Amino acid sequence: MKTDKRRVPAGAAVLRDDITTAIRRAVTQELAEVGYGRLSIEAVARRAGVSKTAIYRRWRSKLELVLDMVSAVAGRKLPMVDAGSLHGDVELLLLVAAGALRHPLASQIIPDLLAEAARNPQIAETLQRTLTGYQDRVGELVIGRAVERGELPAGADRRGAADLIVGPVYWRLAISRTPLDTPEIARMAAAIVAALRVACTGPSLDEPAVWDTRSLTASEPHRAGA
């Protein structure tokens, strides 16, 4: 009777985790310093202290390397404890998001990748998938809990609600780059919760409202011929 003895790869064939981690750290630092356009495999290899061959064993190109890094970061578990209320959960999420967006590496890499996405469909697709996944996790954790507590109705649009939650902090820190302190985060959380209670008990967020610019209030969608 023959037994299946598979040869265990040795030497260069083994993809060591410590080398993979060093490469990922190096590409993050290179992106922050020079951006995607000027990033090179040679520079990443020098910073990581490895050969270019070590990188090409894992990724076929710098595009594949960067896309893998984005996917790995996006796949991390969202650190969210149950604060006991919708307001508490929203405020905690804003604090977590603000901390991440204030990080020097994130503040430099995110705008660069968003600009690159306008030119590169593969980066655009990965970022879209990443952001959609993040929306779904926020909806599951924050809106799902609020529904269970009876703070929001069961039919609440979780993805649309996630936009209302993370949109303001992202705008302040990633787009306008305006400082956002802890007291202001608390006030922002209160405003977001008030908006969620109105939005989630009114028409679906999937249905676009027609805005009356004279009164700055949403009106009913116009009927044909009205």
Image: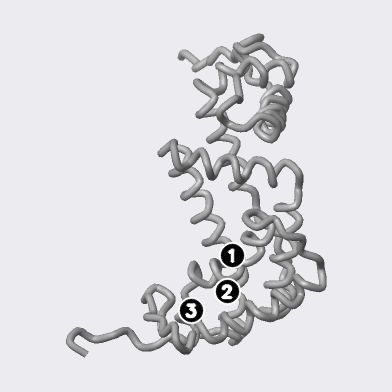
Q: Which residue is mark 2?
A: 143
Q: Is residue 9 above or below residue 164?
A: above
What's the residue at 63%, 20% (across, down)? 15
Residue occupying the point 77% across, 72% down? 184
Spot occupied by residue 175 in the image (x, y as percentages of width and height): 62, 55
Q: Which mark is residue 156?
A: 3
N-terminal label among 1 and 2: 2
> How busy is the neighbourhood of tag 3: few (under 14 within 10 Å), some, or many (20 plus)?
many
Q: Residues within 10 Å of mark 2 (few under 14, many from 20)?
A: many
Residue extending furthest toward the left:
225
Q: Residues within 10 Å of mark 1 (few under 14, many from 20)?
A: few
At mark 3, the secondary structure is: loop
Q: Position of residue 167 (x, y in %)?
A: 59, 65
SS at mark 2?
A: helix
Between 119 and 88, the one nearer to me in the picture: 119
Quadrant (top left, top right, bottom left, bottom right) of the C terminus = bottom left
Question: Quadrant location of residue 212?
Answer: bottom left
Give me the residue at 63% from left, 80% from top.
193
Vertical position of residue 63 compared to residue 209: above or below: above
Q: Position of residue 106 (x, y in %)?
A: 69, 45
Question: Mark 2: which amino acid?
Answer: Ile
Q: Could you tell me how far apart the alpha carbons at marks 3 and 1 are, in whole angstroms?
A: 17 Å
